[in-house]
Amino acid sequence: MTMFGDYSAYYDLLYRDKDHDGEVSYIDSLIRKYGCGARTILDLGCGSGKHALLLAEKGYEITGVDRSDGMLSVARLRLAEGKPEATSPRFLQGDIRTVRLGNAYDVVISLFHVFSYQAGNEDLRAALATVRTHLNPGGIFIFDCWYGPAVLSERPAVRIKRLEDEAVELTRIAEPVMHPNENLVAVNYQLYVRDKANNAVDVVRETHLMRYLFKPELELLTAEAGLALLDASEWLSGNPLGAGTWNACFVVKGK
């Protein structure tokens, strides 16, 4: 099943408690630390556009790319409903492994585990080639991912999440299946959606393959792509990586 198909319609409700403001402030701090006056950003896997819009409010010129029609529809609707600004993002459809925009940027970002969705080695190599192609000389690439030591130390477990808004009531069941020889977790989602107006229940099923990554393999893959790893730390905290670090953040520099 295609990932982020029907699921995308409920994405913002499912992650309404996500601290987008804090995450954008963190990204901005990394750009200021490593980016040397960077102004232009390419957001690979921009999803519903929240990060892009908040970065635009900080004055960055940003282009968002996503392969999901559903996600891009949400992003464009959010853009249309917001305040028009000279730095408003562009949202384009494309696969981060193959998209070529003909432009270069000071910064490339790929957030909320987009790189963990690159399940195979060739997927990772292709995505890094896209990054390298779109980076200005000396530009930086910032991404987060599932960190392998934590996945193996604290195995993924079945999780149930319940949410509602004025229109619907959601129950999401996430059932992970480990594939240790491929460094993958198949997360099987079942989403039950009750329409409050008529009590009709819709069921959405999707499987998301998630690659957990390790620092040595990323050092190797980024070097192969002509990039250099600058920093590796825990997402948002900046603490050193460890066996309890589920979400790792990497900063890579173009040569």
Image (spheres, helix red, strand yellow):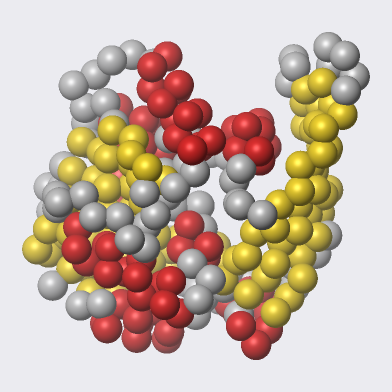
Which quadrant holds the C terminus? bottom left
In the rendered structure, the answer to whether residue 202 lies left or right of residue 94 reads right
User: At which x and y percent is residue 147?
Assistant: 55, 72
User: At which x and y percent is residue 65?
Assistant: 35, 45
Residue 89 falls in image quadrant: top left
For residue 110, say whether it is visible: no
78, 228: nearer the viewer: 78
In the rendered structure, the answer to whether residue 236 lies left or right of residue 166 reads left
Residue 185 falls in image quadrant: bottom right
- Looking at the image, how many numbered discs can be counted on the residues? 0
User: At which x and y percent is residue 128?
Assistant: 32, 69
In the rendered structure, the answer to whether residue 16 lies left or right of residue 20 reads right
Q: Residue at x 28, y 15 (%)?
A: 84
159, 127: nearer the viewer: 127
User: Looking at the picture, does residue 168 appear above or below residue 72?
Assistant: above
Which quadrant holds the N terminus? bottom right
Q: Residue at x 36, y 49 (%)?
A: 94
Q: Residue furthest right?
A: 199
209, 219: nearer the viewer: 209
In the rendered structure, the answer to whether residue 36 lies left or right of residue 56 reads left
Residue 149 falls in image quadrant: bottom right
Q: Residue at x 22, y 31 (%)?
A: 59
User: At which x and y percent is residue 5?
Assistant: 61, 43
